[in-house]
Image (tube, grey):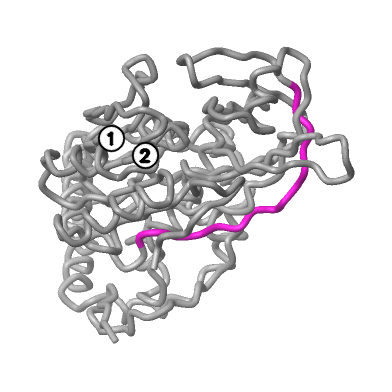
Amino acid sequence: MKQHHGPDGRAHPRGRQKRPFDNGTLRLLVLDMIAAAPRHGYEIMTEIETRTAGAYRPSPGVIYPVLSKLEDEGLISCEAADGKRKLCQITDAGAAYAVANHKRVRSALPHRGGRHNVPFPVRDAMDALKAALRGRMGTADTTTIAAMAEAIHAAAETINGLTDQASEPDMNQIITRHRHEIRRRTLTVTNTQRLTPHMIRVELESPELEGFTSLGFDDHIKLFFDTGTDKPAMRDYTPRGFDAAANRLTLDFAVHDAGPATDWALNAGVGTQLQIGGPRGSAVIAPVFDWYLLVGDETALPAMGRRVEELPAGVQVITVGAVIDGAEEQTWTSDADLTAHWVHRPASAATNPAPVLDALRDLPLPEGRGFIWIAAEASVARAAKEYMLTERTHPREWLKASGYWVQGEADAKAKLDD
């Protein structure tokens, strides 16, 4: 078993760690910390480890969904501040909420055991600082007090910098899975748009979207289509976008051979209703990578577009989209450094891996850690996955592949992760 060294310098087992508080208290603790000072995600992870005397260090897959939830609730705001990482700051609403719940956070924290948990060199330095302050406070004038405060702030910034340098991404838990309450909701179409000749965007709204949660860019919701019988037809679709403030959900429909989803999208107009369910859960990729490669066909474009648009500044994202011709290419905007590649092949060749593999063979990959996401017809996705693992020797843990559809099978998907 790997050993993990806590702030006390002692080794701790690095297996599954038991949280000292539940998800609700963790959310409040994170908010309380951001209320005290703006922080990056890894600063929060390190501070929680310190506050629990090394007993618990949350993984990126735990902390970043908490930050996303707090941001969705309007309690914090997070923006890229130094190239790669987002700095999270408290909002007015968040500050008020943190004050109201501060006592609950303090009572939930495990007992830290006092000064004996602080390494001796640090404890000795803390005592020296306190002695110096006590010796000068009685006689210090305004100028001296300002200089003392500046020196202490400078020391704090230096220590924070040392903590940042020492904090390495936890690569043991790349993907975390989150379960959601399953509800069926009835939505109403408010707008439709032809993005390309074979892609229709539909916007739907409803008060029933209150509480809707989609943490992963490749989440799936279930769409229910009336068949005139007791059993509706069901299809899985990616939430292309969700505006919680407006209770608005955006879906993109790839128009292909006739089917219940295609027929509905072609005929949907303002006022048309649609029932949805889910998402059942979300798979969240820890934001610890320098670059991302997204590979997919028409059915994967909604997830690819959402991912590109959600990535922050300071990372590179490369897309390889397989479509029938140039008219089907989409334009995405992103704070990230985007490089888009398009593969043209006829619809009849959508199950042929060769065009996609040819594009991948000619594709240079950036330096650093990279995550690869692949989604297409099952045989294409499987071939692309095996190529990246064997020929390009990409780490298996840093790749996710899915068969979004299976040739000859209606409403079929293939799980390719083993």
* Mark linked to residue 320: 1
336 relative position to 199: left or right: left
Other residues around mark 1 within 10 Å, as few (<14) / some (14–19) / many (≥20) = many
Query: Looking at the picture, which amino acid does disc 1 mark?
Result: Val
Whether pointer 1 and pointer 2 mark residues with C-beta atoms closer than 8 Å, the reply is: yes
Foreground: 229 or 102? Answer: 229
Is 15 contained in the magenta span?
no
Is residue 385 shown above or below 84?
Answer: below
- Which residues make up the magenta segment? 174-188
- Rendered image: mark on residue 296: 2
Q: Looking at the picture, which amino acid does disc 2 mark?
A: Gly
User: What's the residue at 25%, 36% (across, down)?
Assistant: 317
Does any portion of residue 210 appear in the rendered image? yes
> How far is mark 1 from mark 2, CA to CA?
7 Å
* Quarter of the picture holding the C terminus: bottom left
Q: Residue at x 72, y 36 (%)?
A: 210
Q: Where is residue 149? Give x, y as percent.
A: 23, 43
For marks 1 and 2, the one nearer the N-term is 2
Q: How many marks?
A: 2
In the rendered image, residue 411, in percent from the top left (x then y), is placed at 61, 46
Position in image of residue 234 (x %, y %): 70, 43
- Say which of 282 and 49 sits in front: 282
Q: Is residue 114 above or below residue 282?
A: below
251 lies left or right of 118: right
